Amino acid sequence: MFWVVQENIKDEATYDHFIQALYALNIEHTLVKVVPFSHDVIPDVNPTGRVMVWGSTTLDFVAKNKGWKPGTFLNENFDQRIWRTKYPTLNDDAEGRDRGN
């Protein structure tokens, strides 16, 4: 599996661990920048075979547009309303949430 990974992710600790794992496991990958307000990446990459992305939802849309498979975790089930149906206590311990009290 080839990974296309977005640079400049906010959660740098997780990002660093992910990148280290790719190198440690000798997994083919490339780093890209997502152009703001577009569906373009720099560099424009077109890997073949199985491709997966790690980054913003914009990068997920790039994967879908390029037809990368499996490409992304983003699908019709990527919706909080669907998750709440299956996992009714999801985020119940979150702070600042209006619980109608």
Image (tube, rainbow, N blue to C red):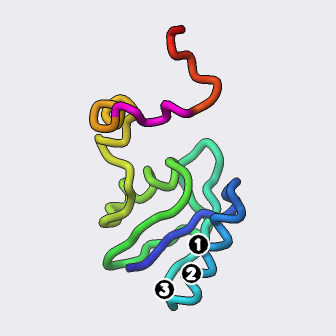
**Residue 68 position (above or below residue 48):** above
Pick the residue in front: 61 or 13. 13
Pick the residue in front: 39 or 59. 59
Q: Earlier in the sequence, mark 2 or mark 3?
A: 2
Residue 18, label in figure: 1
Q: Quadrant of residue 101?
A: top right
CB under 8 Å between discs 2 and 3: yes
x and y percent of residue 41 in the render? 57, 60
- Return the residue at label 2: 21
- Position of 19 with respect to 4 (left or right) is right
- Distance from disc 3 to disc 1, alpha carbons, whole Å, reads 11 Å
Residue 27, label in figure: 3
Nearer the observer: mark 3 or 1; the answer is 1
Label 1 secondary element: helix
CB under 8 Å between discs 1 and 2: yes
State the extent of the magenta-drawn residues as a range: 88-93
